Image (spheres, grey):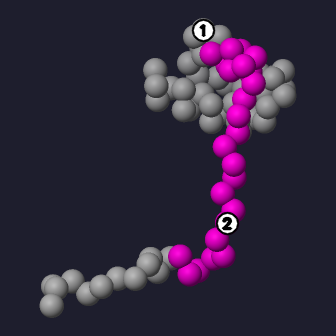
Amino acid sequence: AGAFPRRIGHPYQNRTPPKRKKPRTSFTRLQIAELEKRFHKQKYLASAERAALAKSLKMTDAQVKTWFQNRRTKW
């Protein structure tokens, strides 16, 4: 007798097959130390700087980009 019809699930769930969630990436202590050191000096990186840092730390460009984005939220 509620005013709202009962909804079961979400309509968008049935459109695409569920994607497997990527496991959380864990960085080494060295990688984190280097990222923190760089962040302390520079809060934003240009794409060339980001690519160079990623290469030196054996990380992807996207990983460095995301790490900096996440780190700035805590700054």
The magenta-colored residue range is 13-36
Whether 23 is among the magenta residues is yes
Of marks 1 and 2, the one in the foreground: 2
Place of residue 8 in the rendered image (x, y in percent of width and height, measured from the top left): 40, 82
Q: Which residue is mark 1?
A: 41
Q: Is residue 59 left or right of residue 68?
A: right
Q: Residue at x 53, y 76 (%)?
A: 13
The tag on residue 19 is 2
Taking 32 as reference, is 7 above or below it?
below
Q: CA distance from mark 1 to mark 2?
A: 38 Å
**Which corner quadrant of the image does residue 71 belong to?**
top right
Structural crowding at the residue carrying mark 2, measured as other residues with C-alpha within 10 Å and reported as few (<14), some (14–19) or many (≥20): few
Q: Which residue is found at the position 15% from the left and 85% from the top?
A: 3
Percent x, y of residue 2: 16, 85
Dots 1, 2 in contact, CB < 8 A: no
Q: Residue at x 21, y 83 (%)?
A: 4
Task: State the mark number for residue 66.
Answer: none
Name the kind of residue labelled 1 in the image: Lys
Disc 2 on helix, strand or loop?
Answer: loop
